[in-house]
């Protein structure tokens, strides 16, 4: 009978020890994160870049057109922020310093009745290619010597991330942005037939 009791005690210790090991193992195992659904963005197709000279004022403007298609499956509000970054570091906002007369002349020259300027295009975009919107983007050209220009487009995605500020260390919210790089070799010509090609287009956080 003593042997039986001793055997039961040993068996009980083994069972408890195994349970403890299993519990510790499960605690040490990292929790599996739930899969994150990918963010759906608006499809953005940009044209090549052109230079326009206003015959009335003699001022120069960079301009491009684009199409935006909503393939997210639901209605999305479109309020883009579009900037031009010059290779010397200057940042120019769409429409800043651009006369309404220059915009009217460009729309007349392009002969596209569906083309909308930065204010007209604001609003809801319905799903599907049949509800695509076409936009006109115009920037003032302060000088005609850049070799590369970058167009930054925000408002196509709601995805963001936080990064520490490089100087202060404070968290900064960065937004998913389309960066379009244009090459401007030689002296740019203010002719509608002269285009400056896209050399790269990618998503970045800015």
Image (tube, grey):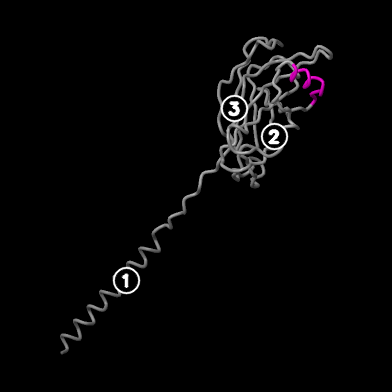
Image coordinates of residue 99 in percent, x first then y, are 81, 23
Kind of element beneath mark 3: strand
Kind of element beneath mark 2: strand
Name the quadrant of the C terminus.
top right
Taking the view exactly as shown, the residue that stands out farthest to the right is 56
Image coordinates of residue 147 in percent, x first then y, are 64, 16
Kind of element beneath mark 1: helix
Q: Is residue 19 left or right of residue 73?
A: left
Taking depth in this image into account, of 123 and 144 the one nearest to the observer is 123
State which mark lies toward you, 2 or 3. 3
Q: Residues within 10 Å of mark 3 (few under 14, many from 20)?
A: few
Q: Determine which residue is flagged by label 3.
A: 45
Q: Determine which residue is flagged by label 1.
A: 19
Image: magenta residue range: 97-108
Q: Which mark is residue 11?
A: none
Along the polypeptide, which appears first: circle 1 or circle 2? 1
Image coordinates of residue 198 in percent, x first then y, are 58, 20
Q: Is residue 80 left or right of residue 98?
A: left
Quadrant in the rendering for residue 70 = top right
- Alpha-carbon span between mark 3 and mark 1: 60 Å
| Magenta highlight on residue 114 | no
Name the quadrant of the N terminus.
bottom left
Q: Is residue 38 above or below residue 118?
A: below
Image coordinates of residue 188 in percent, x first then y, are 68, 11
Along the polypeptide, which appears first: circle 3 or circle 1? 1
Q: Residue at x 60, y 17 (%)?
A: 183
Q: Residue at x 59, y 27 (%)?
A: 45
Q: Is residue 53 left or right of residue 194?
A: right
């Amino acid at each position: 009978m003593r042997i039986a009791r001793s055997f039961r005690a040993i068996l009980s210790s083994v069972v408890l020890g195994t349970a403890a090991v299993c519990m510790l193992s499960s605690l040490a195992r990292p929790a599996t994160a739930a899969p994150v659904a990918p963010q759906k963005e608006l499809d953005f197709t940009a044209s090549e870049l052109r230079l326009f000279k206003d015959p009335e004022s003699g001022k120069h403007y960079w301009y491009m057109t684009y199409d935006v298609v909503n393939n997210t499956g639901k209605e999305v509000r479109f309020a883009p922020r579009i900037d031009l970054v010059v290779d010397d570091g200057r940042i120019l906002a769409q429409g800043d310093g651009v006369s309404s007369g220059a915009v009217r002349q460009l729309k007349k020259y392009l002969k596209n009745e569906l083309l909308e300027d930065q204010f007209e295009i604001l609003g809801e975009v319905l799903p599907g290619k049949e509800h695509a919107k076409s936009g006109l983007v115009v920037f003032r050209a302060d000088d005609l010597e850049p070799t590369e220009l970058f167009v930054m487009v925000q408002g196509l995605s709601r995805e963001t991330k936080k990064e520490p500020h490089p100087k202060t260390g404070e968290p900064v919210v960065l937004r998913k942005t389309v960066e379009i790089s244009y090459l401007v070799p030689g002296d740019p010509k203010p002719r509608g037939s002269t285009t400056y090609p896209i050399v790269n287009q990618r998503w970045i956080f800015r």
